[in-house]
Image (cartoon, grey):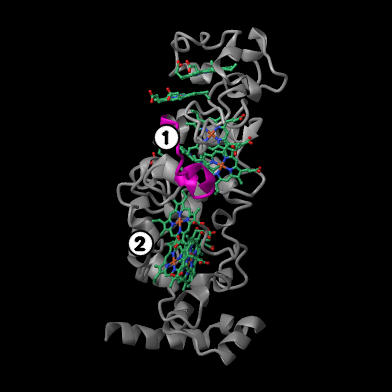
Amino acid sequence: MKLFIQLIMLCGLIMTSAHAENTPATEAKATATVKPSDALDRDSACTRCHDETENKPILSIYQTAHGNKADSRTPSCQSCHGESEKHLSSKSVSPDIIFGSKKGVFAPSDVKDQNTACLTCHDKDQKRTNWQGGAHQVADVACTSCHVSHTAHDKVRDKQTQPEVCFTCHKDQRAQVRKFSHHPIAEGKVACADCHNPHGSAGPKSLVKNTVTETCYTCHAEKRGPFLWEHQPVTEDCSNCHTPHGSNITPLLKSRAPFLCQECHDGPHQSDAPAAGNAAGIQGGLSPTLPNGNFSASENFTGRACMNCHSMVHGSNHPAGALLHR
Ligand code: HEC
Ligand code: HEC
Ligand code: HEC
Ligand code: HEC
Ligand code: HEC
Ligand code: HEC
Ligand code: HEC
Ligand code: HEC
Ligand code: HEC
Ligand code: HEC
């Protein structure tokens, strides 16, 4: 009842407001053809002052999913900013919720309050079920540190521009993706959110899947196998050998072979074979895979090293591939 009276009063205000005559043509056209939802009706409480004359893009919100006039769930100004009764009667008092992190005319609200305003509608969305307890929630990162609401283009949801947003806080990853070997993130072909759910997840490091390896398989399905001869560290965790964002050792390797391999295979080859990294590997029946039929100690320590013979590092389907050499 109280709300109803308020609405009547507001309608009166709108009708006498000078702003009402200045309603932009586009808006007038839109309201003439589509029956505005109650939410948009209620916006007039705010838009009688905050209109197209603002130097910030307030009304562009109608070009976003939050301006969908046909959807009854569409938020009004007050669904996000709060009823703001005091602000309505005195513009020197702040609205209930001020978003962002920088002080403008008014100080920003507590991050928890800002996020609650969004989560009243978005906490049931499937992709945000792990927000509570996720790294960003725990670190008090606001939804609006990543998302903008009044701008039609939400940078963080566009593959091309998403990294810019993440890099404002994640400087290490910015440096990593510039390394010689990298996922094409800066190129706009792979996005951070292809591997991470920024809203938190059940996996480690907010990965979209429950493990690193499952996350990698979403694109590198051919590495999943099944292989007749598996290489244990591959099925265990791709990051035993690879680093996800960037490396100066191609392809995205943590270190160079033979050192990479010797982190686990530190002993010599079996008695009848040469010591790993030694010269006479031609005895073991693997020599046909060598490009020129022989190799020297120096070659073993450069380039593909161990992979000159053990070329199937990710697993082999050859009946005789137990040594990952074919
Ligand atoms: C009577 C006119 C009036 C009404 C009605 C009004 N505002 Fe304001 N609002 C202002 C003025 C004046 C400011 C001070 C900043 C400025 O000059 O733009 C302001 C500031 C704000 C700010 C902070 C802007 C900034 O740059 O930091 C927000 C957010 C805001 N209003 C939201 C709302 C919302 C939401 C409503 C509806 C519930 C509303 N306002 C209704 C006049 C009004
Ligand atoms: C009153 C409910 C409500 C509130 C409050 C609300 N939203 Fe939404 N939001 C919606 C609806 C409805 C949609 C469109 C339908 C959908 O995709 O679920 C939507 C869509 C979105 C989208 C996707 C846009 C697109 O183009 O697909 C983002 C991002 C979003 N909201 C972020 C936010 C943020 C950030 C806040 C807080 C500042 C917020 N929402 C507050 C209801 C709300
Ligand atoms: C660390 C940055 C970041 C934060 C913080 C963040 N988001 Fe997002 N959000 C994203 C990205 C990136 C996407 C696009 C995801 C994709 O492409 O899969 C997205 C997508 C969305 C979408 C639309 C698509 C979907 O996933 O359903 C909604 C709605 C949304 N976010 C709401 C929120 C709300 C509510 C909060 C605060 C509780 C929030 N976001 C916090 C980065 C963020
Ligand atoms: C989905 C939630 C949501 C809705 C709905 C919403 N706002 Fe906002 N508002 C925000 C967020 C978030 C910001 C911070 C800047 C941004 O993200 O664009 C903001 C910023 C503002 C500002 C300050 C401008 C600035 O850039 O600092 C004003 C004024 C404002 N809103 C008024 C309104 C008015 C008037 C309406 C209704 C037409 C409205 N808002 C509807 C979330 C919302
Ligand atoms: C190809 C998948 C992939 C992409 C794309 C990706 N990441 Fe990651 N990220 C991972 C994996 C896997 C880990 C965990 C292993 C690690 O820390 O090396 C990780 C870890 C992280 C961590 C935690 C680091 C730590 O030491 O705790 C941050 C922060 C991060 N990524 C941010 C980003 C950002 C920002 C982007 C986009 C610029 C991005 N990631 C793109 C896969 C990816
Ligand atoms: C406003 C700053 C801010 C922005 C923007 C931001 N992050 Fe974060 N992020 C943090 C903080 C703070 C942490 C927690 C401390 C840490 O690990 O550095 C974090 C942690 C992470 C982690 C580690 C997750 C875990 O579970 O350990 C990943 C992955 C990540 N962010 C990815 C992203 C991605 C992807 C984006 C862009 C879509 C992004 N972040 C944008 C501040 C930010
Ligand atoms: C969203 C899809 C996607 C996911 C998920 C993904 N990758 Fe990639 N990966 C790519 C693309 C695209 C390339 C570039 C392929 C090209 O240039 O031909 C690539 C290239 C690579 C390369 C070769 C890099 C080079 O310098 O040649 C390696 C190694 C790699 N990815 C490992 C991983 C690992 C490990 C994971 C899991 C942490 C992973 N990828 C997850 C899409 C993905
Ligand atoms: C034992 C170390 C090791 C592990 C574990 C490993 N890789 Fe690799 N990966 C390599 C090496 C070494 C190369 C370079 C091979 C070459 O030069 O012949 C490579 C190359 C690649 C390439 C680029 C060339 C190609 O074969 O497509 C991709 C993509 C790749 N790995 C993905 C993955 C994925 C996904 C996983 C986890 C399922 C994984 N790797 C686990 C060592 C490893
Ligand atoms: C993270 C540890 C780890 C790394 C790094 C690693 N391996 Fe392995 N590798 C293993 C394990 C564990 C097995 C299985 C050993 C077993 O079954 O006795 C294995 C098996 C093998 C086998 C089969 C021989 C056998 O006894 O089954 C070959 C060949 C091999 N690795 C070569 C390599 C090469 C070449 C590299 C470098 C590109 C490498 N490995 C890197 C852990 C590793
Ligand atoms: C010139 C080819 C060649 C090169 C280069 C080579 N190996 Fe081998 N490797 C073999 C042969 C042949 C065997 C089989 C020995 C046997 O059956 O007794 C073997 C066996 C292995 C085995 C099985 C267990 C063992 O000790 O016999 C592992 C593990 C292995 N190599 C790892 C490596 C690593 C790590 C490197 C690089 C430091 C490497 N190899 C370089 C030819 C090579």
Question: Does the image show residue 139?
Answer: no
User: Callout 1, which amino acid?
Assistant: Asp
Residue 324 shown in magenta:
no
Q: Distance between the residues labelled 2 and 1?
A: 34 Å
User: Observer-nearest residue: 190 or 292?
Assistant: 292
Classify mark 1: residues with Cα within 10 Å, few (<14), some (14-19) or many (20+): some
Q: On the rendered image, what quadrant is the N terminus found in?
A: bottom left
- In the displayed structure, 15 sits above or below 274; it is below
Which label is found at residue 50?
A: none
Q: Give the range drawn in magenta.
A: 215-232
**Tag 1 secondary structure:** loop
- In the displayed structure, 84 sits above or below 195; it is below
* Residue 124 % position (x, y): 33, 65
Q: Does the residue labelled 1 lie within 8 Å of ligand 8?
A: yes
Q: On the rendered image, what quadrant is the C terminus found in?
A: top right
Q: Name the residue under label 2.
A: 119
Q: Name the residue under label 1.
A: 237
- In the displayed structure, 52 sits above or below 126; it is below
